Image (spheres, helix red, strand yellow):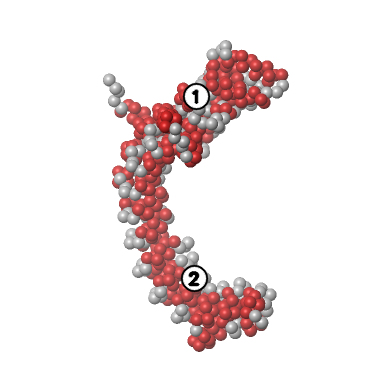
Amino acid sequence: MTTDLLVNEAWRPATAPARLRELAADPVLARIVASRIGLPADLAEELAAEVALRAEAGGPPWTAVARALAAQPATGPERLALLAAHPDEGVRRAAAVHRATPGSAVDALAADPSAVVRRALAAREELPRAVGAVLAADVCADVRLAVARRVGVRPEELDALADDPDPRVRRVLAVLGRGSAADLTDPDPSVRRTAVERHGHRDLAPLPEALVGDPDPAVRELLASRWRNHDPAALARLAADAEPQVRAAAAGNWYTPVAQLTALAADPDRTVLAGLVGNRLAPPAALVGLIDTLAGLAEADAATGREPDPDEREERRRLVHEVLDHPATPPESLRRLYALELTPYFHEGNALSQPNWPPDLFARFALGYCESTVEGEEERESFARIERAVGTEPPEQVLAAMLGSPIHYLRRAVANRHTPPEALAEAARSPKGYDLDDLARNPAAPREVLLGWAAENWRCSAMLENPELPVPVLAAIARCSDDDHAAEARDLLEVRALRARARRETPTPC
């Protein structure tokens, strides 16, 4: 019979035990038999005894069978104890990780001369306490690293490793949150990065000065994020960092001072500009400056005839769209950006949920967007009436009239800050199909409406997107039952307080 057929027979689940015994006379086939899932325990023991008899004369082929048996689930504890003392490192390694290896053998393997075997033993899910302590003090760093990574590692083993000389071990402890404060100033940058990444702003608050000057840009970038830094002074320094990824992180942080956020609007790096426009609390002055930067880039290209590459063009387009969607972009800045025609795919429908569009543009967008969908006499009459009013009545009154229209897209005037407050209050009381989340995001939404929703824990997520949400409403949300909403409201109150303090401390120009 050919070798391939015999190999297939040795692997085949239906092969009878008697035939497996016959096949196991050959070391190559014996290794396959020893590796079979579901091997009967008696057959595994017979095969192990045969290996023990033939190993001395048979050499490496039978050693491979011994390795397979040391990894075989059916191999019994007594046989595993013998295999754990085998002269071959690979056999001892397999026995070290076998769940049935007896405790006496595990104790002996902790002193094995091979670091490979001790490392395998250190990775066991179940490890006697005394053996764990020995391996945590092993001379080989790879063994100690395996202890730190072990699924069932004990607190005292981690404590023993806290000041390990190997940075890989210290990094694992930092990942597990079991490192020490020294990790934040560890000489290895990967340990410092992990330690900073694992800590929140409260833990890091005493150390901003040391970390702001960290030589590793990745550490400084992590420190610049909102989750890890609420210190305006430290963020002011990070906003002026030489590395753009650090400035980008500072640009996206709510707590970065207004002056620095405004300065970053002129940053030459597009990742910084993207971080700034992604900051929901970017001040209006910064967004005005960002529009100036985008306009300047377009004007420079037009003057020189330069064509931006596709990636740069797509990044600029994305920046323009995000400025258009930002809740703090001033109305006249939106008008200017729209007039510059920097975005080739402007969607009028998207503007209907943005609160700051000038009322005349908003009315034009709404009429243009819904014109093709108007149907029925009532809707046609309403459309014609509002279209006439656009040229004859104040824009704010046009928006108020739109709220009473049967046309859904015209009622989106509930989102616009120029809609009169009394009309917005009536919309909040009306059963008509208004998008009240749009109203919750509207800076002109009546305070009493917002306070009522906050008291009932309604629309908190949408209200938190309102850039001018009154402080009493924020305070009410900070007490709500939703932990995430309450925490965000507390952060917003903290940012408002810090900015108010900065305004008071800024000298008034003569």
Identity of the residue drawn at 46% across and 79% down: 88
Identity of the residue drawn at 63% across and 84% down: 22
State which quarter of the image contains the C terminus: top left
**Label 2 residue SS:** helix
Q: Which mark is residue 339?
A: 1
Q: Is residue 201 among what the camera can see?
A: no
The answer to which image quadrant residue 433 occupies is top right
**Label 1 residue SS:** helix
Depth check: give the residue in front, 360 or 56: 360
Q: Is residue 252 above or below residue 152?
A: above
Badge 1: how crowded within 10 Å, few (<14), some, or many (20+)? few
Check if mark 2's residue and mark 1's residue have beta carbons within 8 Å.
Answer: no
Identity of the residue drawn at 47% across and 24% down: 336
Say which amino acid is labelled 1. Ala
Identity of the residue drawn at 59% across and 14% down: 389
Depth check: give the residue in front, 372 or 196: 372
Q: Position of residue 257 (x, y in %)?
A: 36, 33
